[in-house]
Amino acid sequence: MSQVNETDPTIGKLVADASRDISTLLSKEIELAKSELKISVRAGGTGVAMFAVAGFLALMSLIMLSVAIAYFIHWGGEGLALHWAFLIVFGFYLLLAGLLVFVGVRKVKQVRAPEKAIEQGREIPRALRGQA
């Protein structure tokens, strides 16, 4: 049997030291995660802003394209009257929007609840009780 020296730490001191060290480690990990998240959020915010500006510019270019198409249909007075040209472009966009709504409604109707996952979730309490 080994002898216990007075300089040897007690179990209580070892547990207290371990608890303090774990607490310090966790707080440092949380600080690290916060600093990483700040950098990620900043980069993500910049990316979202870039997408917003790109979307706005795409919308503006669509408006200019629409005007150009209408003037192309008008063709310097030799084509259709300008008001009819703009109505044709408007009608095309209206038909395109209707088609997108139709396809979108069909896709939304295909959405179903995750039945297999729900069934497995219902089995978890039974499995935890040992009634597999």
Image (cartoon, grey):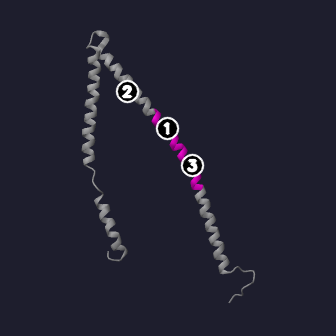
Name the residue beneath numbered marker 2: 62
Residue 11 location (% of width, % of height)? 65, 80
The kind of secondary structure element at disc 3 is: helix
Name the residue beneath numbered marker 1: 49
CA separation, marks 3 and 1? 16 Å
Is 44 one of the magenta-colored residues? yes
Residue 44 location (% of width, % of height)? 51, 44
Residue 124 location (% of width, % of height)? 35, 69
- Seen at 28% across and 60% down, the residue is 115
Closer to the chain start, of discs 2 and 3, is 3
Task: Give yes or no for contact between labels 2 and 3 (Cβ–Cβ under 8 Å).
Answer: no
For disc 3, the neighbor class at 10 Å (few under 14, some 14 to 19, many from 20) is few
At label 2, the amino acid type is Leu
CA separation, marks 1 and 2? 20 Å
CA separation, marks 2 and 3? 36 Å
At label 1, the amino acid type is Ala
The kind of secondary structure element at disc 1 is: helix
Residue 36 location (% of width, % of height)? 57, 51
- Would residue 98 be found to the left or right of residue 34 on screen? left
Residue 48 higher or lower than 131, as above or below: above
- Can you tell which mark lies on residue 38? 3
Give the magenta-colored segment's residue range.
32-53
- Would residue 119 be found to the left or right of residue 39 on screen? left
- Seen at 55% across and 51% down, the residue is 37
Q: Quadrant of residue 52?
A: top left
Q: Quadrant of residue 126?
A: bottom left
- Seen at 44% across and 29% down, the residue is 57
Residue 64 higher or lower than 18, as above or below: above
